[in-house]
């Protein structure tokens, strides 16, 4: 093997990897077995040996490229010239930046009146270590979607709970992750029923940035997010402030009567209680209790609880129970109030 042929091989190999780098493709590893085969092919091609036309059979027989290959011939007074004539063909140019792993460049120097270098270029694929696997692993996508879920919960779900405190369920996103990690199309395959929340959630997911997928190929991702209100699976209702104040105002005279009966025995009695109760879905009261009580009068406390048990509120919104607290304060009438 002459120095001119070796120089030609090195030039062609370096130029191919430079082109691949320009196309953001990994450089090809030189393979001596492929190089020896390519040298033989280059010599046969230069000499017009018919065996040069049987390269495919020889590659198969020798087991050089079980996963695919690309073989191309060229010539020129030096390596760069030989490669330049190759890349003028757009299909060849595309192949040189294809998904290959190893490279064999063989050359044969022809000392004619105008000496030239006959070149054979063999690119070989290797098995894809991630064949059949997604372009992004859950370890790469889950942290991104988890951060998005936190933002969706704070910016979209919490405001939606103000409108419906029992809103719960899953959002199922289907999104396309593009080759650079940006998000393409976003669809909601499962919804909760809150348009404002769902619109905001899609906007957040559409702005996400993922790691670049394997080989820059777009990836389809389906990802669920579950949203549960603070009370868990228990359904809660809601009463307006007006409903609560109106109901207690309607019972004010009965609460006052409890106090005035106690005042007959203890003329200086004054103080306050905090009433805690649950309003059932039909408006009836359940489980009234006093959480604070400054009177220390058992009969007064029992009377207040009896009146509370008889309260009846409007039917709560969302068909759930309402837990509420309500303060009651009592003090003796002033002299002017007590005068007939």
Image (cartoon, rainbow, N blue to C red):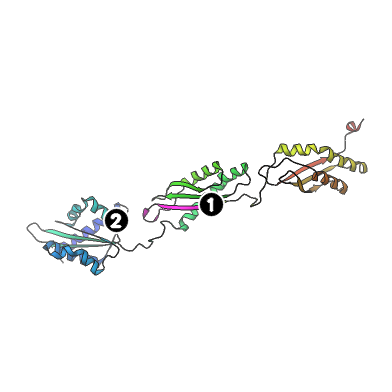
Asked where in the image residue 21 lies, by quadrant, the reply is bottom left
- Give left or right: position of 322 versus 115: right
Q: Disc 2 versus disc 1: distance between alpha carbons? A: 38 Å
Residue at x 80% of width, y 44% of height = 308
Asked where in the image residue 317 lies, by quadrant, the reply is top right
Queried whether the magenta region covers residue 78, the answer comes back as: no
Q: Mark 2 points at which residue?
A: 98
Residue at x 45% of width, y 49% of height = 175
Depth check: give the residue in front, 311 or 16: 311
> Which disc number belongs to residue 171?
none
- Give left or right: position of 257 versus 325: right
Describe the element under mark 1 as helix, strand or loop: strand
Badge 2 crowding class, 10 Å Cα cut-off, few under 14, some 14 to 19, many 20 or more, is: some
Q: Which residue, as the protein is rendered here, is positioned at the far left?
A: 113
Percent position (x, y) of residue 16?
A: 25, 56
Q: What stretch is highlighted in magenta?
A: 210-223
Percent position (x, y) of residue 172?
A: 51, 50
The answer to whether the residue labelled 2 contacts the one labelled 1, judged by CB atoms less than 8 Å apart, is: no
Q: Name the residue under label 1.
A: 225
Report if residue 3 is visible in the image: no
Residue at x 92% of width, y 41% of height = 264
Q: In which quarter of the image is the C terminus?
A: top right
């Amino acid at each position: 093997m002459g120095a001119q042929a070796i120089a030609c091989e090195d030039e062609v190999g370096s130029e191919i990897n430079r082109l691949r780098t320009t196309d953001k493709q990994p450089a090809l590893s030189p393979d001596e077995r492929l190089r020896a085969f390519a040298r033989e092919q280059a010599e046969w091609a230069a000499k017009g040996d018919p065996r040069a036309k049987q390269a495919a059979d020889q590659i198969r027989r020798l087991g050089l490229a079980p996963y695919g290959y690309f073989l191309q011939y060229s010539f020129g007074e030096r390596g760069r010239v030989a490669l330049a004539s190759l890349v003028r063909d757009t299909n060849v140019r595309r192949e040189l930046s294809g998904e290959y792993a190893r490279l064999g460049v063989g050359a044969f120097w022809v000392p004619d009146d105008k000496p030239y270098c006959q070149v054979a270029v063999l690119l070989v694929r290797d098995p894809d270590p991630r064949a059949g696997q997604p372009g992004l692993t859950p370890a790469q996508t889950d942290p991104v979607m988890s951060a998005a879920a936190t933002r969706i919960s704070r910016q979209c779900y919490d405001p939606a709970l103000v409108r419906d405190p029992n809103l719960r369920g899953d959002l199922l996103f289907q999104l396309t992750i593009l080759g650079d990690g940006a998000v393409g199309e976003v669809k909601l395959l499962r919804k909760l029923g809150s348009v404002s929340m769902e619109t905001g959630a899609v906007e957040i997911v559409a702005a996400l940035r993922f790691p670049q997928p394997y080989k820059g190929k777009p990836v389809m991702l389906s990802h669920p997010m579950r949203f549960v209100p603070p009370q868990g699976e228990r359904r809660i209702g809601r009463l307006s402030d007006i409903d609560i104040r109106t109901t207690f105002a309607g019972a004010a005279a009965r609460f006052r009567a409890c106090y005035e009966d106690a005042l007959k025995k203890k003329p200086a009695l004054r103080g306050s209680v905090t009433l805690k109760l649950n309003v059932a879905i039909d408006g009836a009261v359940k489980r009234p209790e006093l959480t604070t009580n400054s009177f220390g009068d058992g009969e007064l406390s029992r009377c207040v609880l009896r009146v509370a048990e008889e309260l009846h509120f409007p039917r709560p919104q969302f068909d759930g129970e309402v837990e509420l607290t309500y303060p009651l304060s009592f003090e003796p009438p002033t002299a002017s109030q007590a005068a007939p």
